[in-house]
Image: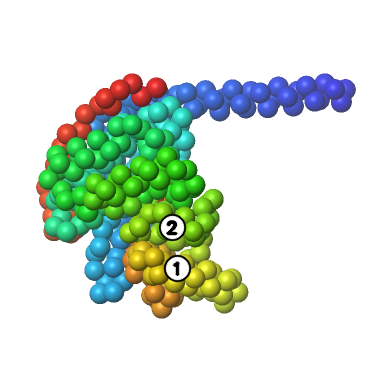
Amino acid sequence: EAKQGGRARVQVFEEGLRERSADRVRLEQDLRRALAREDEIEVHLQPLIALEGDRLWGAEALVRWRHPERGMLAPGRFLAIAEESGLIVPLGHRVLAEACAAAAAVPDLIVSVNLSARQLHDPLLLATVRDALTAHGLAPDRLCLEVVEDVLVDDRTIGVLEALRALGARVAIDDFGVGASSLKQLRRIPGALVKIDRSFIGSLDTAEAGDDDRVMVRALVNVAEQLGLQVVAEGIERPDQLSAVRDLGVTIGQGWLLGHPQRAAAFVTSCGGGPLVRRGTRPARRSAA
Ligand code: C2E
Ligand code: MG
Ligand code: MG
Ligand code: MG
């Protein structure tokens, strides 16, 4: 009987797996279809604020998917599928083009675009970035490319980041402090921005956990200053977190307190810019699979 119970559990488990993978297959098909359309994949922009002078410094592009049945999906729901299927490459082209269009519509705005490991390995990445800049008439330093620190442990991806820097684009190390890199790796990307992970900012305004995180942020700011890097604090939600990061010497802030992500066109309008003209978006130049 125990055996039978075990078998039943295995069966339920397998059905669960099948159900989940069927759902993934559906979502992948839906994503492929969505990328062939204009109205489902959206780019939202969240302000990056220069803390000295409280001015708009730039904006981070964050992809969203307005799924016809499932509603608005955050990247956490579909990036893994995009990554595994290779659809991240055409998706990335779309985001890059829309971000560049926004930068072209707002004088001096810097746009920051996330790149996954798979995108960094795309042999056409540099050409794609160069084309997007040219098509929108943008100086390369108006574009920043964000990568998580884990890519810094791989010499090949460091080479790609160096090539992006050589092109004149900016590079940011995203979610810094929680990944597989070390402070030492920062030396390999001169001029990068360092985005301190949200988890260090969350408790800055509390007495209990705040001290450890304050020590970490202060150390990071010191290292960054020595290396000539700019420090960005992510996930600022409350006024006391903002004053804490200011006091610790962080130069750029991002978070709900400073501005939520909003659709690119609305963001551009709120900056007094516009219209938003996306240029040179073409379907992926090679099969995505
Ligand atoms: P990320 O690059 O670290 O982006 C910041 C995330 O924090 C975003 O989540 C943003 O909406 C969220 N956020 C901003 N301010 C706050 C705040 O004050 N509090 C909290 N709790 N969260 C805040 P989102 O949009 O869900 O994106 C998640 C991740 O997906 C991004 O993390 C990035 O790694 C990835 N991603 C987003 N768009 C793209 C894209 O176009 N391409 C690629 N390859 N990855 C992307
Ligand atoms: Mg990012
Ligand atoms: Mg981040
Ligand atoms: Mg993050």
Image coords of residue 271 (percent x, y): 18, 59
- The picture places residue 89, in percent across and down from the top left corner, at 34, 32
Please state the horizontal and vertical placement of residue 82, each as a whole percent of the image.
41, 32
Vertically, is 228 above or below 53? above
Choose top left, top right, bottom left or bottom right for residue 126. top left
Q: Quadrant of the C terminus?
A: top left
Residue at left offset 18%, top offset 43%: 133
Give how far apart the Cα atoms at labels 1 and 2 are.
Answer: 9 Å
Which residue is rendered at x = 51% and y = 53% of the image? 181
For disc 1, the marked residue is: 223
Q: Is residue 53 left or right of residue 148?
A: left
Quarter holding residue 4: top right
- Tell me what residue is drawn at x 35 percent, y 66 percent: 228
Q: How many marks?
A: 2
Asked if 72 appears above or below 20 in the picture, the reply is below
Q: Are marks 1 and 2 in contact (CB under 8 Å)?
A: yes
Q: Nearer the viewer, residue 214 or 187?
A: 187
Amino acid type of disc 1?
Val
User: Which quarter of the image is occupied by the N terminus?
Assistant: top right
Locate residue 134 relative to residue 55 in the image: left or right: left
**Disc 2: which residue:** 186
Q: Nearer the viewer, residue 43 or 85?
A: 85
Mark 2 residue type: Leu
